[in-house]
Image (cartoon, rainbow, N blue to C red):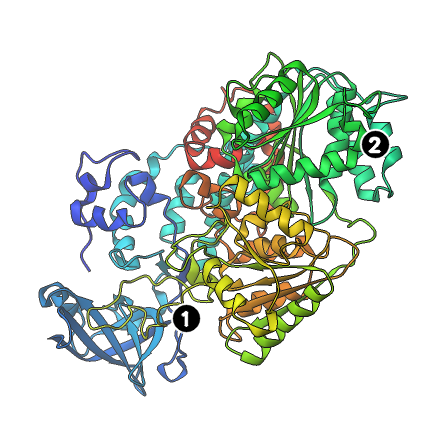
Amino acid sequence: MSELAVPADASGLDAPLERVLGKPTAKGLATLGLTTVGDLLRHYPRRYVEPGERTSIADLEVGAHVTVVAQVERATVRTMRARSGAILSVVVTDGSRSLDLSFFARHAGALRPHESRLVPGRLAQFSGTVSEYRGALQLTHPDYEVIEDAEGLGEMPPTPIYPATAQMPSWKTARAVRAVLPALVDGLPEPVPLEVRARRGLMSLPDAIRTVHAPAKVADAYRARRTLRFEEALVLQTELARRRHAALVLSAVPRPRVEGPSLLADLDARLPFDLTAGQGAGGEGIAADPGRAHPMQRLLQGDVGSGKTLVALRAMLQVVDAGGQAVLLAPTEVLAQQHHRTLTALLGPLAEGGLLGGDERATRVALLTGSLGAAATREALLDAASGRAGIVVGTHALLSERVQFAALGLVVVDEQHRFGVEQRDTLRTRGDDVPHMLVMTATPIPRTVAMTVFGDLEVSTLTEVPQGRAGITSHVVWADRPAWMQRVWQVVREHVDRGERVFVVCPRITGDDATSDGADLLDDLAAQLGGGTSSGASSSDGRAAGGAGAGTPPARRAVEDVVRELEGMPVLGGAAIGTLHGRMSSDERDRAMAAFLEGRTQVLVATTVIEVGVDVPLATVMVILDADVFGISQLHQLRGRVGRGTLPGTCFFVTRAEEGSDAAQRLTHLAGTTDGFELALLDLSVRREGDVLGASQSGGASSLRLLRVVKDADLIAEAREEATDLVAADPTLAAFPALAAAVEARLRGVETAFLDRG
């Protein structure tokens, strides 16, 4: 196979691939998101195949990715009859069994290069995913290398397998890498300081790049990958260490806990329950930070129903007692309104400052959202600017320039991943002093994820659930079993008859929607269905490029259709059914939620707008239709909307996924545990890690290349230790220019979306 030639003037990592490798190759690489030589060098193989790793044709199984060394028996190019285009059909044998290979193109001429290499008698190594067509096993568009020296097969180096697209199969990427590697790799800057490399037993960056693309042995490749993972971790942790260091020089007004009579003491006295041990310990940790002259930067995380809102309220009251104001920023109006109701209910007369019946030390809790009327908005703005409202709850409307505060001392951000960096910083830079910051997340985050994503924050974790919660029982229900579905709706009827409330969640609002309200809805539907994206497009004679097509996924259930269906069910006759979704106006959503809370609506058909924050004590049943569409953590959050009072909750995960598929197994695992931290680890193993890290905020792909925040926990800890020492010795990184440049380069765009979360 001929190699690509690199022009003599094509030097530098920023050189465009079109100039270096030519327009056709560059166009293919662009489908992988690669536009420069540096991009290409950092496009690492996803795995390696050793010459000895061979599967006999007799042992092949559909769906397995295999490597077969076989001899070509015949190869024929023909024009397809049913559709336009051409196909190269190749039959190969390992001496005992035969295997079909298929290559598709728009015209026969495009297949001639393959035909000229795959001549009868030629020995080659073929790699691909086994599929079945008309009862015969086949490989479609396999990667292959012709073996010129059969005697030396055992001495061949491993074959790197790259992420591929239909336009850029692995072998083409390998050719492109081989073209640029010799000329450019030695010019790579070295971000990891020499003493760190020596201490951690790492390779130099040029050696690591060279080895990861062209290893002599697979063991060498994985040693190189460890070096590259460490480099990636060090760059990220260095930026986080710089931010921690920079926070030490920022000034904040100390807001220590007031001893003696106070709003906080009054709240504790009126609570009808005791704090959990976690709430008490977490509260003490959070209480110490605002008392310092440096801004608090802390993450408060906890599982569904662990009581984060009460911990945040106690922190806000501490700041109010010390003469400051607190803001609670929520991503949706439904959640903001829920927080406002919860805080005012917990405070009672303590939230009625200046009003008849208000406590002598009372403050006010103002609500500011975009849908408030003019008079209510003016009053909320006045309460905030005058300081009359010690606590202001709101949505993005709080970020408006016209919102002013008398003495903003604490910003609490709920569901931080829903906000952009610039939006969050709008509040933090509103005054002369930086307010203290408390970030809350209802999605449990494993420690290693928190260390990477929120590495500049102190972390407080709530692991207990307050007493009195009755718990939730979950079941997986197969949608194609009428008797099972009939029982689900019978259970709904039974709970409605007892005066309880039922949620029914759908992924879409209308039947023709391409999207839903869910901020965390998985983009890669194929992954959730237990499949995977094919590296090729559909072939021109109707077969999927990966072999037999799995068919088009069934249309997902929509709110409007499900409401009509439920209204027509005899088993639900007389039940009051309502709707709630993101296309309703704020007033409509308020009325829908009020009707549900008061019992005028008994069954609420909704999208994931109810995912977080919605608290309906009498809600006991959750039916999630097309549950396999949603992420694991999102399903866990939805499930947490029921069983929040003294009545037990029941959740049905309704799915059309095949039994035994990956999607079905994930739902079964989810139904078997309510441990959010265990589920978060499972979620990380399923979802694109960039989504978990929030990269989707910037519209980019995963922000991590080789680093995996759970699998590489120990390595991340090592990098954090080294980064902390480097920044402590030289905060500007003047002595480490290559590391400083790497930080600057890696923090452009998508990385900033999650690194700036502190």
Helix, strand or loop status at disc 2: helix
- Lower sequence index among marks 1 and 2: 1
Q: Is residue 696 left or right of residue 425?
A: left
Total numbered badges shown on the rendered structure: 2
Inspect the image, locate mark 1, and give the three-letter code of the amino acid beneath it: Glu
Q: Label 2, on which residue?
A: 267
Compared to residue 574, the image places residue 601 above or below, namely above
- Image quarter of the N terminus: bottom left
Q: Nearer the viewer, residue 268 or 701?
A: 268
- Image quarter of the C terminus: top right
Q: Label 1, on which residue?
A: 53
Residue 125, percent across and down? 30, 70
Inspect the image, locate mark 2, and give the three-letter code of the amino acid beneath it: Leu
Residue 234 at least partly seen: yes
The image quarter in which residue 67 lies: bottom left
Residue at image position (56%, 18%) is: 429
Compared to residue 319, the image places residue 158 above or below, namely below
Residue at image position (65%, 19%) is: 383
For the residues labelled 1 and 2, the Cα–Cα distance comes to 67 Å
Q: Nearer the viewer, residue 404 or 685?
A: 404
Q: Nearer the viewer, residue 319 or 457?
A: 319
Q: Nearer the viewer, residue 259 or 447?
A: 259
Residue 83, percent across and down? 15, 72
Mark number, residue 356:
none
Residue 746, percent across and down? 43, 34
Residue 424 at least partly seen: no
Q: From this viewpoint, which residue is outermost toward the top? A: 432
Density class for disc 2 (Cα within 10 Å; few <14, some 14-19, many ≥20) is some
Residue at image position (57%, 23%) is: 375
The image quarter in which residue 678 lies: bottom right
